[in-house]
Image (tube, rainbow, N blue to C red):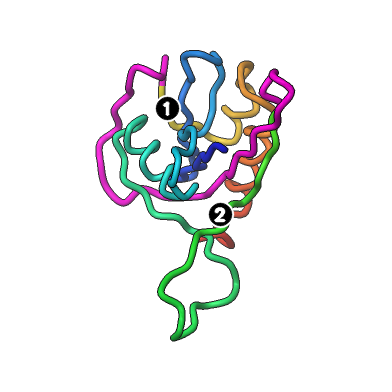
């Protein structure tokens, strides 16, 4: 399984140009053994971008007194063909920056903030990433 985060700031979405795929993607990566997907997303965002984040979607039902916590809801869970007769699920979360300074790592060829218009013009971006980014930007007021 993989986990990625659509991070929004000032009407823009953060994308990283993944070195292996040569595609603009949300920061994120593979879930390690024993790791919850949202924890993967937090770890991978920090590693790939230098930012600490918080999630914005916990659903419409508030936490009850008997609950010790809750998990953020992905905005989408996609299934991808691995090319090896297996399917890899990917949880796409929505978040915003808490702190940090933008820093690209070795897994990325680039990193940047993109408006809706710029996202629509990107050539090397998967259709699902484009669709999620545009949806999140169009609905940001409702999501946060």
As displayed, is residue 100 above or below residue 17? Answer: below
Comparing 2 with 33, the one in front is 33
Q: Which residues are the magenta region?
A: 81-110
Q: Is mark 2 on a helix, strand or loop?
A: helix
**Residue, x 54% and y 13% (percent of image)?**
22
Is disc 1 surrounded by few (<14), some (14 to 19) or many (20+) residues within 10 Å?
some
Q: Which disc, if any, is residue 140? A: 2
Q: Does the magenta stretch include residue 103?
A: yes
Q: In this view, does 142 lie to the left or right of 99?
A: right
Comparing 18 with 35, the one in front is 35
Question: What x and y, as percent, mark residue 83?
Answer: 70, 18
- Badge 2 vs badge 1, beta-carbon distance below 8 Å: no
Question: What x and y, as percent, mark residue 56?
Answer: 48, 58
**Residue, x 48% and y 30% (percent of image)?**
15
Give the main secondary structure of the magenta stretch.
strand
Q: Which disc, if any, is residue 112? A: 1
Q: Which disc, if any, is residue 78? A: none
């Amino acid at each position: 399984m993989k986990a990625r985060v659509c991070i929004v700031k000032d009407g823009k979405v953060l994308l990283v140009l993944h070195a292996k795929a040569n595609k603009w993607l949300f920061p994120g990566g593979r879930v390690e053994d024993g790791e919850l997907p949202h924890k993967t997303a937090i770890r991978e965002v920090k590693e790939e971008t230098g930012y600490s984040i918080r999630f914005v979607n916990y659903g419409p039902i508030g936490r009850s007194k008997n609950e010790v916590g809750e998990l953020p809801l992905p905005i989408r869970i996609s299934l991808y063909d691995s090319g090896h007769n297996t399917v890899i699920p990917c949880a796409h979360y929505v978040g915003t920056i808490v702190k940090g300074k933008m820093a690209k790592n070795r897994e990325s060829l680039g990193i940047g903030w993109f408006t809706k218009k710029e996202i629509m013009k990107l050539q090397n971006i998967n259709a699902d990433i484009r669709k999620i980014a545009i949806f999140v930007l169009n609905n940001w007021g409702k999501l946060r």
